[in-house]
Amino acid sequence: MTNDFDRIGRASRARKAAVRAVTYALLTFWALMVLFPYYWMLLTSVKSYSAYNGEYVPTFFTLAPTFQNYVSAFSEVPLARYFLNSLIFTIVTTGLMMAVIIPAAFAFARLEFRGKNLVFSLFLALMMIPNELVIITNYQTITGWGLRNSFPGLILPSVTSVFYIYLLRENFAQIPDELYSAAKVDGTSDFKYLTRVMMPICKPTIITIVILKVIECWNSYVWPRLVTDDPAYFLVSNGIQEIRENGFGRENIPAMMAAVVVISVPLIALFLAFRNKVMSGVSRGGIKG
């Protein structure tokens, strides 16, 4: 009997080990597939122009890396100025959006007013509208206000988000009602309750929203291309397109890849630094109760 139990135990451990090995193998393969484009981008950015164009068969390494492509990326177009524009656009847009969505989420989660559920349902219905229709409406509005080629024209259409309001509202709704009742008994105002109680409790989700919005702003392309044609207001995404339109992007792919690497580094560093907050915030937003 003991031998039978031992065999069953060994067979069970062998199956678990086999499943674990297959799982890790698949995850490793998938990770390599995801990371390979970034490796290829980085590799191409350190290849010289002659080496890149002389490769009839692409190579997966280089013995003579060069950083001249990074110099070219900043000298061919004013990439530093585009970085500054993107930084201003990202910080201001994210700050204004948080100032809008936090009170809105608090109102939908905690306050009671006539038609609250109807208004919130209409808000959610806005998520069903195709982005193309919103872009057309925003373009006509910004043009009518004379805000083309300006930071307000870039920023205003992005200062709110129905999805982020919904995500934050779900987090606020998880906080027990007893805390709010006790705070009101103590004479605490709604603003103080929001800033002293709700926001600290939901800090992971708030950080997640900030990071996601920063990434969204940094990667903005379609709207800046529509509302700006003055290089003084170009963002980093416009800079990559300008490189291609100026010609050297098609002729000097390594220099173009160097510009892409420089633009990608801040977002990659941001995500790696706050990845735990992002995961916990998103998972918290999807749990009700």
Image (tube, helix red, strand yellow):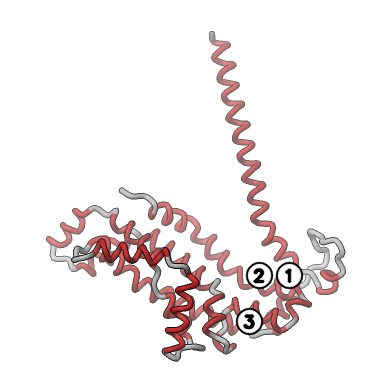
Residue at left offset 60%, top offset 33%? 19
Q: Secondary structure at mark 3?
A: helix
User: Which residue type does callout 3 highlight?
Assistant: Leu
Q: Residue lying at the far bottom in this picture: please name it.
A: 146
Label 1 Cα crowd, 10 Å radius (few <14 / some 14-19 / many 20+): many
Quadrant location of the N terminus in the rendered image: top right
Q: Check disc 1 and report the residue beneath it.
A: 45
Q: Residue 188: which disc?
A: none
Residue marked by disc 2: 261
Does 102 appear above or below 167?
below
Label 2 close to label 3 by CB (< 8 Å) = no
**Mark closer to the chain start, 2 or 3:** 3
Q: Quadrant of residue 262?
A: bottom right
Of 67 and 253, which appears nearest the observer? 253
Please name the amino acid that badge 1 sits on: Ser
The CA distance from mark 2 to mark 1 is 8 Å
Q: Who comes first in sequence, dot 2 or dot 1?
A: 1
Q: Is residue 236 left or right of residue 56?
A: left
In the picture, the disc for residue 79 is: 3
Q: Is residue 289 shown left or right of residue 265?
A: left
Q: Are marks 2 and 1 in contact (CB under 8 Å)?
A: yes
| Amino acid type, residue under disc 2 in the picture | Val
Q: Nearer the viewer, residue 269 or 214?
A: 214
The residue closer to the viewer here, 109 or 275, is 109
Say which label, 3 or 1, has the lower sequence index. 1
Q: Secondary structure at mark 1?
A: helix
Percent coordinates x, y for residue 278 in the rendering: 46, 58
Discs 3, 1 touching: Cβ within 8 Å: no
- Residue found at x 69% / y 57%: 36
**Residue 47 seen in this snapshot:** yes
Crowd class of label 2 (few under 14; some 14 to 19; many from 20; radius 10 Å): some
